[in-house]
Amino acid sequence: MQPDLTPRSQVQSVLHRQLPARVVYAPNYWQWFTHHQNHGLLPDELRGCGSQLDLLRYLDVDVFSRNLYCDPTRCWFGGLSEEVCEDVEIEERRTKEGQDTLTERIYRTRKGILTERLRFIFADSTFVQEKFLLDNFETQLDAFEEIVRGRRWRFNPGLYRRWQDLVGEMGLVNAGELFGPLKLLQLAAGADKAVFLLLDHPERCQEWMNLHEAAQLDLVEQMLASSVPAMTAMDNLDSAFHPPHYIERCSASFYEQASRLCRERGSAFFIHACGQQKALLPLIGALGVDGLEGVAYPPLGNVELNEALRLSGDRLIITGGISAFETEKLASYDEVRRYLELLLQRIDP
């Protein structure tokens, strides 16, 4: 019987901590493709590609992606889950301002109305938040609590299966639908003001984080019931925003429980990460997390790939190895080959 050497089987081997037949190469071209397509900058040989998946298929690479299905003009992550909120009316308005796309979400609660506004900047293909739900702690906390108490997420297994069918044997769709308790506060108030929330309202914040953790674990269970093989919490781990003591206080319980649930059901739990991660790796490795997407090394981060593996106790599956800086610098096949030789030597064994 011939071994299964399809890209999908190789990705599965890595997730199950089995030795793959070859190195898995699954590049992320989400923002690059969106920008070049929207601005008519695609190279001639890629002009027939209508989507990032078309591009990956043309390049004949592996797929391990949580952004194939995500609309970059609407959100940073997600698209397989619907937000539902008991006793709260949610309205989303989409408008154009020049070439930019504005998304405004309005939450009408019994304790008041909260609004957030997000902008897709067409010129830069960048998504930014212009207004947070919480920008006045004196008047808005009761309304925010109504949202947190009533909010759940409903996973769409049919949509997930449609995307996985489109990918086929090229690899796997990674469900990037989750975000942890600390990220809840950061998305609601901004990373800086979330610190003031935690300092000024510690008991209330803890209650909100506990409620959010329960809702997110319910979403984990829904995805596991749909046999999702890998899922990612989009928390953007960076010690500037997620210092170890904040992770221990706010998010460690969620990471640990989600990892355990996934492990028991044959799935893998990842956390999105970038920036300065060196101080976080021992803690994240100890929580049972399966992997990071990905490790940022200098000049964006502060740790090399081989050191990251050592600090995490060789526990983590790390997506990474070639950053945008290397992609820009490597100008020939020979340069790419030499770079990879040195990379593999550094992480040996």
Image (cartoon, rainbow, N blue to C red):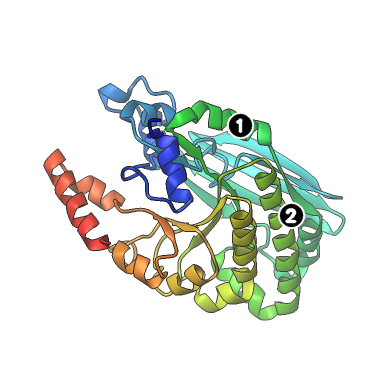
Residue 344 place in picture, x, y as percent: 24, 55
Q: Is residue 117 left or right of residue 281?
A: right
Q: Is residue 346 left or right of residue 93?
A: left
Q: Earlier in the sequence, mark 1 or mark 2?
A: 2
Q: Is residue 187 left or right of residue 218?
A: left
Q: Residue at x 51, y 43 (%)?
A: 66
Query: Which SS class for mark 1?
Result: helix
Say if 32 sits above or below 42 in the image.
below
Say if 349 sits above or below 93 in the image.
below
Instruction: Tell me the crowding category of disc 1: few under 14, some 14 to 19, or many 20 or more residues within 10 angstroms, Cα based.
Output: some
Residue at the far left in the pictured view: 334
Q: Quadrant of residue 347?
A: bottom left
Rendered-image quadrant of the N terminus = top left
Residue 115 place in picture, x, y as percent: 70, 52
Q: Is residue 174 visible?
A: yes
- Tell me how many marks there are: 2
Instruction: Tell me the crowding category of disc 2: few under 14, some 14 to 19, or many 20 or more residues within 10 angstroms, Cα based.
Output: many
Q: Amino acid at mark 1?
A: Arg
Where residue 114 is drawn, which disc sits there? Answer: 2
Q: Amino acid at mark 2?
A: Leu
Query: Which SS class for mark 2?
Result: strand
Question: Which residue in the protein does label 1 denote?
Answer: 161
Residue 240 place in picture, x, y as percent: 46, 71
